[in-house]
């Protein structure tokens, strides 16, 4: 039984918003805390890149193929560029493309899934057959096709990755909407004279926020990986802009045997970033999914 001394703590816990409570549970989770810290460090390094690094990422020098040392922690490449600076600045491109592409794709997928699941009927049938046709193609193949049509560049990559994210996110949101649509309070809102648009955005959308948050965290790793793959193939970020995939495809691949650090450090950056977002997405799913939370 709670005592009088415990009452302030109970009131403070009750006053927390649901998102703050979920965020605290994610951070307190051992796995979530570790990978959330890695992502926070990555974001901080991307924001403070000019102060973290001592060299210009695109400035060349005569110090070519210098192995990792105190002066150059990740070594230098074939034209004397500092690899540590290029890896840090490359995080800006990966995070920029990942965050913008995923947010755009999730927004489009949410609107499509919300209207498809709520309206149903012929609109739902046509929309889902369109989604099925896009899901029939692997994500990287679809992104390659779109970039080949749209052209090379960071903006084109963002648009391509966003289109890749739309079908899968719309399918998840539609399933959540179909579940929420069975609740009695929607019938009560309709009986009170609420319009279809008000019911959809006022009563249905807030109840599918949890799956949307899970989609965002789970899709970021895949989006960064697609961006790196497109840059590796020469269809994404163009030189001399530092990009992890571009670093692997140019000097990293060409001098793999003589200067392995040119491929090792960008590869580690991609692996750690994608792993962190994927693991954090799993923790977010465990925290926000009531079925998984109740099974513990």
Image (tube, rainbow, N blue to C red):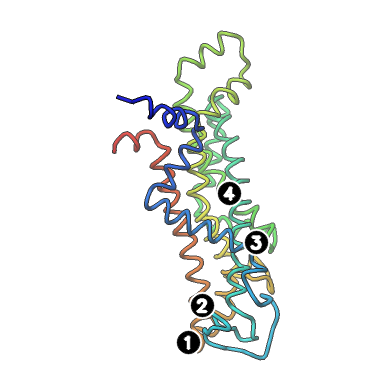
Q: Residue furthest bottom?
A: 62
Q: Quadrant of residue 56?
A: bottom right
Mark 4 to mark 2 CA distance (whole Å) = 27 Å
Q: Which residue is mark 4?
A: 102
Q: Quadrant of the N terminus?
A: top left
Label 1: which secondary element: loop
| Circle 2 crowding by C-alpha within 10 Å: few under 14, some 14–19, many from 20 | many
The relative height of residue 39 versus residue 14 in the rendered view (above or below) is: below
Give the CA distance from mark 1 to mark 4.
36 Å
Which element type, helix, strand or loop, lies under badge 4? helix
Label for residue 263?
2
Q: Is residue 63 above or below residue 41?
A: below
Spatial CA span between label 1 and label 2: 10 Å
Residue 114, position in %: x, y?
56, 31
Residue under pointer 3 = 148
Sequence-wise, the earlier of marks 3 and 2 is 3
Residue 150: x and y in percent read 69, 57
Q: Which residue is mark 1?
A: 257
- Labelled pair 3, 2 in contact (Cβ < 8 Å): no
Pointer 3: residues within 10 angstroms few (<14), some, or many (20+)?
few
Structural distance between the alpha carbons of marks 3 and 4: 20 Å
Left or right position of 244 against 152:
left
């Amino acid at each position: 039984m709670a005592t009088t001394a415990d009452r302030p703590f109970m009131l403070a816990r009750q006053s927390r918003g649901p998102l703050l409570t979920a965020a605290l549970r994610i951070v307190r989770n051992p796995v979530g805390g570790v990978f959330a810290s890695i992502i926070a460090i990555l974001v901080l390094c991307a924001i403070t890149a000019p102060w973290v690094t001592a060299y210009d990422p695109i400035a060349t020098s005569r110090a070519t193929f210098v192995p990792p040392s105190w002066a150059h922690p990740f070594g230098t490449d074939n034209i004397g560029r500092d690899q540590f600076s290029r890896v840090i600045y490359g995080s800006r491109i990966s995070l920029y493309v990942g965050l913008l592409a995923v947010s755009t794709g999730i927004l489009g997928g949410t609107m499509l899934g919300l209207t498809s699941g709520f309206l149903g009927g012929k609109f739902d049938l046509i929309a889902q057959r369109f989604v099925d046709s896009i899901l029939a193609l692997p994500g990287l193949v679809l992104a390659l096709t779109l970039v080949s049509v749209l052209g090379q560049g960071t903006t084109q990559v963002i648009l391509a990755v966003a289109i890749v994210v739309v079908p899968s996110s719309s399918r998840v949101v539609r399933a959540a909407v179909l579940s929420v649509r069975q609740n009695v309070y929607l019938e009560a809102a309709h009986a009170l004279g609420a319009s279809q648009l008000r019911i959809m955005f006022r009563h249905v959308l807030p109840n599918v926020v949890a799956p949307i948050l899970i989609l965002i965290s789970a899709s970021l790793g895949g989006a960064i990986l697609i961006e790196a793959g497109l840059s590796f193939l020469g269809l994404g970020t163009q030189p001399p802009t530092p990009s992890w995939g571009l670093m692997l495809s140019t000097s990293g691949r060409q001098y793999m045997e003589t200067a392995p650090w040119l491929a090792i450090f960008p590869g580690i950056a991609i692996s750690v970033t994608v792993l962190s977002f994927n693991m954090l997405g799993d923790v977010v799913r465990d925290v926000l999914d009531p079925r998984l939370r109740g099974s513990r």
